Image: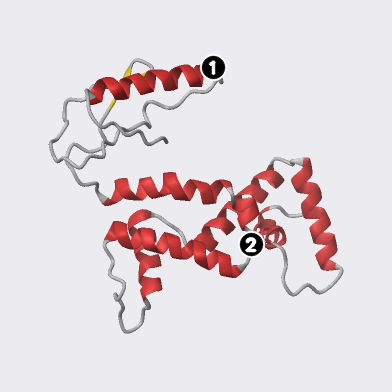
Amino acid sequence: MKLIVFKSGNLENKINKYTNELELWLIKWKMKISVEKSRSVVFSRYKKESDNLNLKNYGNRIILSNKKWGLNQNTLGNLYKSLVGSILDYSFPCLNSISENNIKKLQAIQNTAVRSILIIKYDTTSKYDTTSNIVHHEAFNKLKLLTVSNRLFELSERNVGTGLSHSIPLVVRLVKEYKEGFESRYIAYPTPLYNCYHTISSFFPET
């Protein structure tokens, strides 16, 4: 995703000019984006609606994600997942090794985004729930967002599981080495890879 700022002129022509340039760049690097998954969002200080924009990519029209000003919760949630969640997802091999304190900092960023999207006040509490618990509950129920730690574990579990199910040599060798190493001695803090292996090992019985 790229943010383009246009101060004046014909909005439709300028956006189409950019998408044409993007097409040429993608063709050059042998890449292609999905038109069906593409949506155009216009950010403006003015509230004059632009219902008639005819934006195209690969000759196909890109529909407006919302014809009314003010984005709904689903669109805002998808923006968060695209701009912030994708960074966490693609960085999960590194993030699984960072400290718990840094995980909490990442969770604080996600909590702030969720509060803004769902309009949850900072003092929202109940007799049995803390503010954080309410935020996590609402994030999952309304935006399908897991906590940062749970999302990282899910990605690690999926990665190791896929590696074992497809007998990827590197994953199989690493799991074997970790298993042999940890079974030979007591380890107070197992690594993320070993934790994932123990979680999914029942699905891959030894032969």
Does 77 sit left or right of 27 as displayed? left
Q: Which residue is at the front of the view, 123 or 21? A: 21
- The residue carrying pointer 1 sits among few (fewer than 14), some (14 to 19) or many (20 or more) residues within 10 Å by Cα, namely few
Q: Quadrant of the N terminus?
A: top left
Please state the horizontal and vertical placement of residue 162, each as a whole percent of the image.
65, 45
What is the number of the mark on residue 103?
Answer: none
Q: Residue at the far front: name it.
A: 7
The residue drawn where x is 42% and y is 19% is: 21
The foreground one among 136 and 101 is 101
Q: Residue at x 49, y 20 (%)?
A: 25
Q: CA distance from mark 2 to mark 1?
A: 37 Å
Q: Position of residue 108 (x, y in %)?
A: 45, 65
Q: Which residue is mark 1?
A: 28
**Label 1's element?**
helix
Q: Is residue 203 above or below residue 18?
A: below
Taking the image as shown, residue 181 lies to the left or right of residue 203, namely: right
Above or below residue 96? Residue 83 is above
Q: Position of residue 132 (x, y in %)?
A: 40, 72
Residue under numbered circle 2 = 98
Amino acid type shown at disc 2:
Ile
Q: Please give left or right for residue 125 compared with residue 168 in the image.
A: left
Q: SS class of the residue under badge 2?
A: loop
Quarter of the image where one finds residue 17? top left
